[in-house]
Image (cartoon, grey):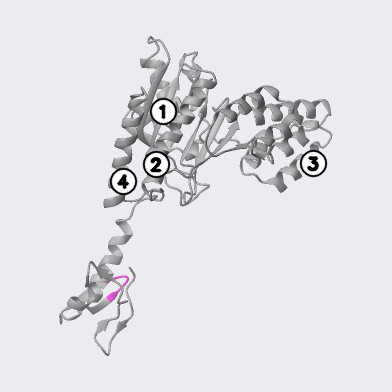
Amino acid sequence: MKLRQFDEKRGRTELAPTEKWGNSSLTEPLQSLNIMVKFNDKRNGNAAWPISAAFWLWEEDILKWAGTPEGSRDRLFEECKRRRRLETDLSSLMEGHGYSEVMTPALEYYDTMVQSGSPIPQQAMLKLTDRDGRIVVMRPDNTTPIARLAGSRLRHLPPPHRLYYRQEVFRSDTQHRGRSAENMQIGVELLGQGGIEADLEVIALAAEALRDCGANDFHLELGHAGLFPALADRLCHQAADAGREQPDVAALRDLTERKNYPLLQDYLREYAVCPAAAALNQLVRLFGGREVFEEAKSLCLPKPLGYLAQLYDMLDFNVSVDLGLVSPLDYYTGVMFYIYLPGMGTAAVSGGRYDNLLSQFGLDWEAVGFALDIDGLAGKEPTA
């Protein structure tokens, strides 16, 4: 709170009447005291102020160092209760479906994240240095550490393994200021099992978890991680055959992820002679229901589209298809999904299939999983 203007005639500091502590005003008892406080510092000079003014000057100084770093915040009372209740209820749900809890350290070696092919930008990781000078990071993702755990602790046990976790992730997202830098997640990883039955199991469990939280009005978006890379690779080959400069796939990926239609169209205009450019322009606009699969036949990607259509037909809740869905976590190799709730600015659940990640830790296992945003749900009132 900032100090209000001091009224010399009335001998007190004017404060807004709405500034309360509980049910009683702070200003009245302080202003009733005929006590003056002397200051002698660079900001206030050598001056005397009533104790009420001194209190607010002191509080203003306190607030400069008593806040929290950007992207973090304190949580109080009811939100804490809702968060603990969600963790307890969802843990019981996961265990009831045969999933066992695992925990990984809050600190991981930076090399582990980078060498595993983690797509999280290094500038988004919160870094520290250990006593030996090695760089460690606050856990930026839960899936990669669990893949590391599986490679070191579970490799001699026959799959499949149904694992769940409830722990925080930490990221410094410089592109989206205001977004939380620490988030509590609860999620599952089904390791060592492929096929549509495993994908369906994980998606159905995510939906059941939301219903258990009292969130019944959710909407699921379904996509496939193989579509954009296939078309981008096709464009690179066609551009080379046409003698054109190689396209910037990272830029194309970013424009597709953000659904930036005008800039994507402008960028691809240089490659108009390449059929894949038209396909990429079409991909980002393919969103809707079952009819999307018919419209997407011109993409000439029958295997991933056929798989996605089969999975779509097996889901019995509110689902839409987004064929231009591109995840910032590009370890996904197959189905991807996001689940949204009214009133939440980001996805309540994100997940997908990542069949190549475990090979970075010496395991030839397929895998699929999801992460649920506990903090987002704790801050949202349940719906009927």
The residue carrying mark 2 is: 183
N-terminal of the pair, mark 1 or mark 2, is 2
Q: Secondary structure at mark 4?
A: helix
The residue lying at 76 percent from left, 45 percent from top is 266
N-terminal of the pair, mark 4 or mark 3, is 4
Q: Which residues are magenta?
A: 41-45
Residue 223 placement: quadrant: top right
The residue carrying mark 3 is: 269
User: In 3D space, how far apart are the residues under numbered discs 4 and 3 (Cα atoms)?
Assistant: 51 Å
Name the disc covering residue 188, or none: 1
User: In 3D space, how far apart are the residues under numbered discs 3 and 2 (Cα atoms)?
Assistant: 40 Å
Structural crowding at the residue carrying mark 4, measured as other residues with C-alpha within 10 Å and reported as few (<14), some (14–19) or many (≥20): some
Q: Main secondary structure of the magenta part?
A: loop
Structural crowding at the residue carrying mark 1, measured as other residues with C-alpha within 10 Å and reported as few (<14), some (14–19) or many (≥20): many
Callout 1, which amino acid?
Val
Callout 3, which amino acid?
Arg
Callout 2, which amino acid?
Asn
